[in-house]
Amino acid sequence: MNLLKDWKNRIYGMSVTFLLAIIATILGNFFPIIGGPIFGILLGMLAIILLKNKRN
């Protein structure tokens, strides 16, 4: 049972990461001076803040 719960958490984490990567890439194309990696870092920092508050 613990294995299934662990697998669901991993799928959730990978899907959030994939979504953030897509958004960062799109924003990087709109603003090439800033670039996708900077948007990825900023979105990751924002996601950590929002998701930690949601889980607690």
Image (cartoon, helix red, strand yellow):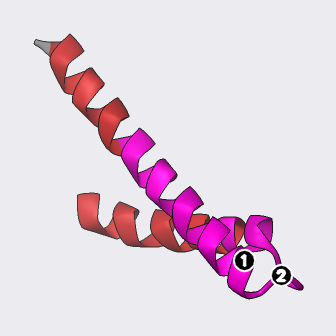
Confirm whether residue 56 shows in the render. Answer: no
Q: Is residue 2 left or right of residue 31?
A: left
Give the residue number, with chain letter if any, for mark 1: 29
The region drawn magenta spans 13-40
- Indicate the position of residue 6 as horizontal and vertical percent values: 27, 23
Splitting the image into 4 quarters, where does residue 45 fall?
bottom right
Q: Residue most toward the front?
A: 29
The dominant secondary structure in magenta is helix
SS for dot 1: helix
- Indicate the position of residue 10 as horizontal and vertical percent values: 36, 31
In the rendered structure, are the residues bearing label 2 and label 1 in contact, judged by CB atoms less than 8 Å apart?
Answer: yes
Q: Is residue 46 left or right of residue 52?
A: right
Tag 2: residue type? Pro
The answer to if 50 sits in the magenta stretch is no
Q: Residue most toward the right?
A: 33
Instruction: In the rendered view, tell whether residue 29 sits above or below residue 54.
Output: below
Residue at 43% over, 40% down? 14
Give the residue number, with chain letter if any, for mark 2: 32
Residue at 65% over, 66% down? 25
- Indicate the position of residue 16 as horizontal and vertical percent values: 41, 53
**Residue 12 has which mark?**
none
Q: Quadrant of the N terminus?
A: top left
Pointer 2 local density, CA inside 10 Å: few below 14, some 14–19, many at least 20: few
Q: CA distance from mark 2 to mark 1?
A: 5 Å
